[in-house]
Image (cartoon, rainbow, N blue to C red):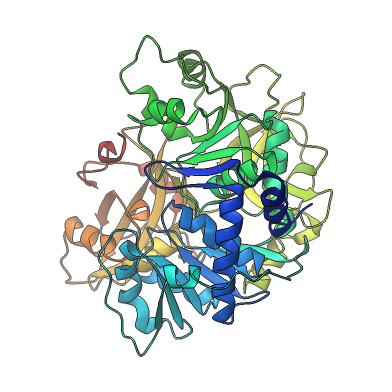
Amino acid sequence: MHPLPQLIEDRARRLADRPFLRVIGGAERSYGEIEHRSRKLANGLKALEIGHGDRVLVMLGTSVEFVEAWFAINRLGAVLVPVNTGFVGDYLANIINDADARVIIAGRRYQPALAAVLPELPGLRALVDVDDGAAPATFDSTAMERIAFAELMAGPERGLDVAVAPRDIGAIIYTSGTTGRSKGVLMPHGQLYMNPRIYIDQLGLGQSDVLYSALPLFHANALLLGVFGALLLESRVALSPHFSASRWLQDIRETGATATNLLGVMVDFILKQPEGDADHDNPLRIATAVPTAPDLGPVFEKRFGVQLIELYGSTELNCPIYHPRGEPRRARSCGRPVSEWYECRLVDPETDEEVAPGQPGELVVRPRRPWMIMADYHNRPEDTVAAWRNLWFHTGDVMRQDEDGYFYFLDRAKDAIRRRGENISSFEVEEVLRRHEAVLEAAVVGIASPFNPHEQEVKAHVALRPGAVAAPEDIARHCAARMPDFARPRFIEIMDALPKTPTQKVRKQELRERGVTPATWVSPDADGRRRAG
């Protein structure tokens, strides 16, 4: 395992002029340039007293500045904390406070959301301002120092004498909470390295491959499998700031991409584009797609001349299960465990006893090497212990295993929702709903989208206070102002009372089965067409 700082310095020394990073519609960097600029930025951050173990928040869109900031932070032995650029209100304040970081590097288009919660951020001391073309936001200058990114980049040329080991924490990536707020996953440098290392092995990638991603850098997929993957391969990576189904094939051709990663819904959107006679004429040869709908996967492969690979992963574990690329497709299977690196079992979630073959059970995983999965949940010792009970990491996901060792995802045992590739905590959405003055109780569940059978949507069930009056549109506007767009309920139903168990717990399964009823308000943008093209 080679920590990121060592790899950056090695590649710059041997491959200084080789192209490394391209942002479509933006800038490009060679290996030498990315090393030089991240070293200058690291010295600038050092002047702000950022050092080994300190956490630095990064709230940027897909850009060369994001990668330069990441590399600079890690080269100081400091910890990258990416912030979902859709976060506003409580979502944003909770993560900034939990990370306990003094410095945030943020693009101007995201700074209004930061300014709105600044009074709730007692620990934040400095904003590194990145000019992304938006107008500068107004801040209380007495609460937070503002420094231009370009000013830090104009720092000295000194070398960085910082030792970073595989066990040192390189990043905290926040993943959806299931019964509480989002949890910060402490990711050692060994884990950051192993995620792309296993990906490269499983997909059979080499130095001549060009990686492409249209996923955001604040998630591990583009960050590690894309950028870090290219760094390991000594190859090139192309990033698109936004996914566009109508531009996807053009991007693949223009960048010469041979490998990419897709979400299942992206496959659906791409296939809905007008078919061309030459769609298969492109350089792409392999891609991961999670989850791949059984009826869409073969169609996509034939149309674009590419092999789709299923896998299973999480922020905590990386990807312990891949479908072998040389084996025939098995509908709905995410593959077999990568046994060189992981042990995987299915157990009864009540007893932790292994279930019989073919029976559903909770997936539990443990690594065969140190430092290759998460170290802890940040500031959440009880959650860490619960997840690691009996010395296995409990994923909360229910699967079954066939006689050939292939795993099949069945359901989420955890009360989380997944929409458009984002994990959504029902707890966090409910917390926002309950702050509406008319709302007495709220219960949020994931339901099958009536517009796309392969997607989940967020549905809120609300009971109002006695005598209170509120329309679903009012509640929707309340949510839109206080949570990221992807988490906003597109389906809202006002009920006289929520269904309860004898112990007064909400019967969420009953609400899931309820789905969309004649009493359900449906957002005008619920069909997703605004974001599909």
Q: Residue pushed farthest top? A: 277
Question: Residue at the spot x=73%, y=71% of the render?
Answer: 161
Asked whether 293 or 448 is in front, the reply is 293
- Label tally: 0
* Figure quadrant of residue 132: bottom left
Left or right of 366? Residue 103 is: left
Quick check: can you spot residue 394? no
Please identify the quadrant where the C terminus is shown: top left
Q: Is residue 298 left or right of residue 14?
A: left
Tell me if residue 197 comes above or below residue 123 in the rendering: above
Residue 397: x and y in percent read 62, 46
Which is nearer the eye, 385 or 223? 223
Residue 183 in the image: x percent, y percent?
A: 56, 64
Residue at image location 32% in from the left, 23% down from the top: 273
Q: Is residue 68 visible?
A: yes
Quadrant in the picture for residue 50? bottom right
Between 186 and 135, the one nearer to me in the picture: 135
The one of 330 and 341 positioned closer to us in this rendering: 341
Residue 351, position as x, y percentages in the image: 75, 53
**Position in image of residue 375 (x %, y %):** 72, 63
- Please give left or right for residue 457 compared with residue 188 in the image: left
* Residue in the image at 31% along x and 85% along y: 140
